């Protein structure tokens, strides 16, 4: 790479709102440091656009530490970009080459309508969580860590599921725009622990019902969601969700579930 930095061409999706037609607009940048994060590179682009009196590119970001899940964008056809188990804010320009053309667009799903440019409305995820992401146990004050004994395999399984940051990469990667990996992770997080078991059956039925109501597609086990997940959530959780949903459905049919 030149000591003057990288020269790159950006094909950026621009769209004023969900009802306006969108299009790719090409921008050229030079002097981009390979040590810059991908979002810092977009910051540089926006500074250039503002200096020219043009509208900056609107995109989601918050913590820039790979925790919040806000930096949702598809880079060269891959959610969060070419680096596995990495969010956009953790992606660095050294993963690209001098002279590269980089195409950037928002998540593509009818359940994630575009708000503007690279920002989509992920309120559907919030409504799924509201449907079943709770426990009825009275938590009260802080309890001793050993008040409820939980085996390490169960604790590890719950923590693996809790790693989901709700970014939506699984939906963007799936050819059916399925939200099964997200729903499965959120259900597993609570269903596997003693505190969440009283609502287990009702939770699964309610969350899957809300997922369907939001218009997400069905899972056909291609595994693209697992490959795109920045936190490494696996298909094992979808298998568990399917088992739990079947059991809950049978209980409801037999009148065993209130």
Image (spheres, grey):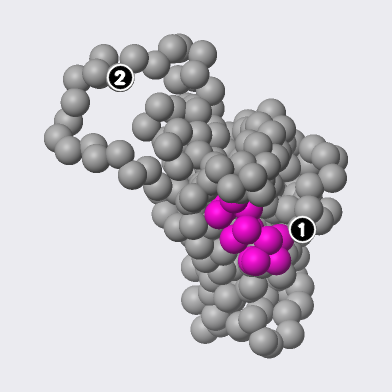
Q: Main secondary structure of the magenta part?
A: helix
Q: Is 195 colored magenta in this rendering?
A: no
Assign the N terminus to one quadrant of the image.
top right
Q: Nearer the viewer, residue 107 or 171?
A: 171
Q: In this view, which residue lies farthest toward the top?
A: 152
Position of residue 252 in the picture relative to residue 155 (left or right): right
Q: Nearer the viewer, residue 228 or 77?
A: 228
Q: Position of residue 131 (x, y in %)?
A: 49, 57
Give the residue drawn at x 64%, y 72%.
113
Q: Secondary structure at mark 2?
A: loop
Q: Is residue 194 above or below residue 73?
A: above
Position of residue 85 in the picture relative to residue 24 (left or right): left
List the residue tagged with mark 1: 217
Is residue 243 at all visible to an observer of this figure?
yes
How crowded pointer 2 is (Cα within 10 Å; few <14, some 14-19, many 20+) is rated as few
Q: Secondary structure at mark 1?
A: loop
Quadrant position of residue 14? bottom right
Q: Position of residue 117 (x, y in %)?
A: 62, 73
Q: Position of residue 197 (x, y in %)?
A: 45, 33
Q: In this view, which residue lies farthest toward the bottom?
A: 20
Give the residue drawn at x 73%, y 53%.
178
Q: Position of residue 22 (x, y in %)?
A: 73, 80
Q: Which mark is residue 256?
A: none
Q: Nearer the viewer, residue 47 or 247?
A: 247
Q: Is residue 93 above or below residue 122?
A: above
Q: In terms of sequence position, does the residue under pointer 2 or pointer 1 come before the other? A: 2
Give the residue drawn at x 49%, y 50%.
258
List the residue tagged with mark 2: 148
Q: Which residues are magenta?
A: 204-216
Q: In this view, which residue lies farthest toward the left?
A: 141
Q: Nearer the viewer, residue 256 or 237?
A: 256
């Amino acid at each position: 790479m030149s000591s003057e930095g990288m020269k790159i061409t950006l094909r950026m999706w621009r769209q004023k709102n969900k009802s306006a037609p969108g299009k790719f607009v090409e921008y050229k940048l030079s002097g981009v440091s390979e040590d810059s994060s991908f979002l810092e590179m977009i910051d540089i682009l926006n500074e250039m656009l503002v200096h020219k009196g043009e509208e900056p590119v609107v995109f989601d970001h918050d913590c820039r530490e790979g925790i919040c899940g806000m930096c949702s964008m598809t880079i060269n056809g891959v959610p969060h970009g070419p680096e596995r188990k990495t969010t956009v804010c953790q992606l660095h320009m050294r993963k690209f080459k001098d002279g590269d053309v980089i195409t950037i667009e928002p998540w593509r799903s009818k359940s994630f309508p575009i708000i503007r440019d690279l920002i989509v409305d992920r309120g559907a995820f919030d409504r799924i969580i509201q449907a079943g992401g709770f426990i009825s146990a009275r938590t009260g004050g802080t309890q001793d860590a050993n008040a409820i004994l939980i085996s390490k395999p169960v604790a590890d399984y719950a923590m693996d599921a809790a790693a989901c940051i709700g970014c939506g990469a699984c939906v963007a990667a799936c050819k059916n725009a399925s939200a099964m990996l997200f729903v499965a992770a959120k259900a597993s997080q609570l269903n596997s622990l003693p505190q969440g078991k009283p609502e287990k059956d009702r939770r699964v039925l309610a969350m899957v019902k809300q997922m369907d109501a939001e218009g997400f597609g069905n899972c056909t086990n291609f595994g693209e969601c697992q490959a795109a997940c920045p936190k490494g959530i696996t298909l094992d959780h979808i298998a568990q969700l399917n088992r739990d949903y079947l059991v809950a459905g049978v209980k409801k049919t037999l009148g065993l579930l209130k």
